[in-house]
Amino acid sequence: MSGILYVVGTPIGNLSDMTARAVDTLRAVDFIAAEDTRVTLKLLNHFDIKKPLVSYHKYSVNSVAENICNRILSGESCAVVTDAGMPCISDPGEELVKLAALSGIKTVPVPAASAVVTALAVSGLSTARFAFEGFLPVPKKQRKEALIRLKNDTHTLIFYEAPHKLKDTLADIYEAFGDRKISLCRELTKIHEEIIRTTLKEAVTLYDGDNAPRGEFVLVIEGAKETDEKCKITLDEAAEKAQTLIDGGMKPTEACKLIAKETGFSKGEIYGIISNNE
């Protein structure tokens, strides 16, 4: 008889947020798949839990996931955990759950806090409709494309960011979006928790000089206003935007498609102007 895969949420910082059900589940399973066994071992020791650990991270996804699923299919039960919060959210646990689903393995969620929803709840921004984007791409070209794609999204937008990249990320977002409200949520539920509600224009200067950002950040940004973008920009201006992307190395069809989504003009209209200008 097949075992069960439990997707177990752990605290995002404060160990007091660990649920009784999560503790009971970790004590009951045969083994635990952990993103970082060192981090998980500290959690287990805190709650006096003794269970075998399997290292399961982004560099070992395929082979380890298959082995885990085979063990579950043979009758063992497994809990997958991440370093903090719910597994599978910007986390390799996503691939394990996908493989478990394909293998017909029963999957049971044991929920806990998620940094995404926690930050959104205290942001002071609209919670009715939101989009979680995780970490922005690191390469400049892909990052610029991602921000152009998101510029006119009316959802509240949520990003993760590491402290050493934060200043550049804020500058890139401000350049792409213009000034908007932003909530910077740092070290949520931890001793040095900080929630700063400001604007993108102000945020880019927050960490100047010796005031270097510290800790993990969740950025919650106001969505674009509902407007008819096509009325605000001409077709020629849209073609110029696409040409700028092409000059930067993007394929013409991709550039026209991206700007079409941003402005409301069709890809064919924009491509036609560019072709006539060649």
Image: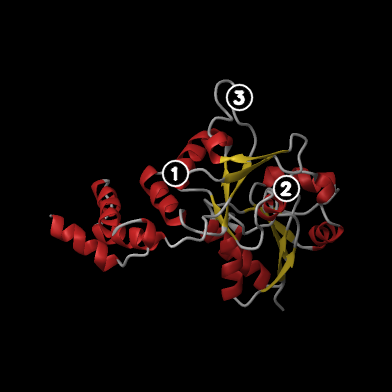
Q: Residues within 10 Å of mark 1 (few under 14, many from 20)?
A: few
| Real-space CA distance between mark 2 and mark 3, rounded to the nearest whole angstrom | 25 Å
Residue at image position (82%, 50%) is 17
Between discs 3 and 1, the one toward the N terminus: 1
Q: Position of residue 124 (x, y in %)?
A: 69, 49
- Label 1 sits on a secondary structure element that is loop
Specify the amino acid type for callout 1.
Answer: Val
- Left or right of 94 in this view: 11: right
The C terminus is located in which quarter? Answer: bottom left
Residue at image position (41%, 52%) is 148
Judge by depth and name the residue closer to the eye, 31 or 235. 235
Splitting the image into 4 quarters, where does residue 39 fall?
top right
The residue under label 3 is 211
Specify the amino acid type for callout 3.
Answer: Asn
- Label 3 sits on a secondary structure element that is loop
The residue under label 1 is 138
